[in-house]
Amino acid sequence: MSSNECTHHCLTTCYHYDDEQQFGVMSVPGADNISFYIPKIHKNLDEALVRQVFESRGIGRVRRVDFVPLTPVEPGERESEYSIACCYQKAFVHFDHLFDSEHAHEIFRKVVRDDESFRLFANPRDNQYWILLNNKMVVPDTTLNDHQMAENHRILTQTVMAQAAKIEKLEEFVYFRDSQIATQKGQIESLLELVMKIHMKMSGSN
């Protein structure tokens, strides 16, 4: 499929499509459960805007977008002040399907098949682009809301901490038992040495 005349002042090849134009579903091997990783995207862009870019360019139908901080946050820890102050974040864009369009096939070949990066010009007017990479570790969808996921995370963190405390106690117990065994072994060796001395003394007196 080819695009209509561009009215967006694109700096590169235009792939904008009219909203009423319909696309088929890409039906090539490996085109299902597609997810792209964007290592750097501005925080002022929400899911609706990201969805609009991918769908209006004829790339695919977006199922959801996951935003995560640039700096990894360990379980149970808060996001760092640097990460909060930073105006960028990461994004994972998950698709219901890719469209059967020229642009989508080009991205699929380069990102998925060739495992390379692709520059998607999100705002061609000021030459802004996103780097698309193949996301090979897709987080499954969930029916839980944010509060339920936060509560599950809290419970999981507590469980992990409780297990860690149990392991620490078991290690202390094992260390105590090892110390007891070492002490008893020393006592046994001393008793054996004493028995040998008594036996030698008795043998000499005979």
Image (tube, helix red, strand yellow):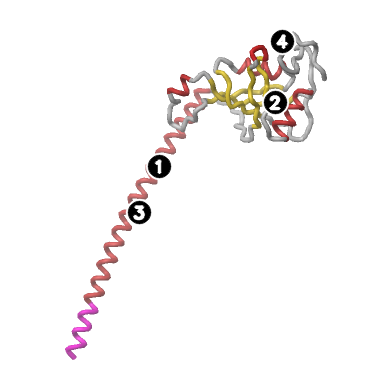
* Residue 52 point in image, percent of width and height: 67, 15
* Residue 191 point in image, percent of width and height: 23, 72
User: Where's the C terminus, which quadrant?
Assistant: bottom left
Disc 1 designates what residue? 164
For mark 2, does the 10 Å Cα neighbourhood hold few (<14), some (14 to 19), or many (20 or more) residues? Answer: some
Tell me which amino acid carries mark 1.
Answer: Ala
Please, what secondary structure does the residue beneath circle 4 have?
Answer: loop
Disc 3 designates what residue? 174
Please, what secondary structure does the residue beneath circle 1 have?
Answer: helix
For marks 1 and 4, give the CA distance: 58 Å
Please, what secondary structure does the residue beneath circle 3 have?
Answer: helix
As displayed, is residue 157 above or below residue 67? below
Please, what secondary structure does the residue beneath circle 2 have?
Answer: strand
Whether residue 91 is in magenta: the answer is no
- Tell me the residue at 66%/23% (across/down): 63
Disc 2 designates what residue? 96
Which quarter of the figure has residue 78?
A: top left
Disc 4 designates what residue? 9
Of labels 1 and 4, earlier in sequence is 4
Q: Nearer the viewer, mark 1 or mark 4?
A: 4
Tell me which amino acid carries mark 3.
Answer: Val
For marks 2 and 4, give the CA distance: 29 Å
Of labels 4 and 3, earlier in sequence is 4
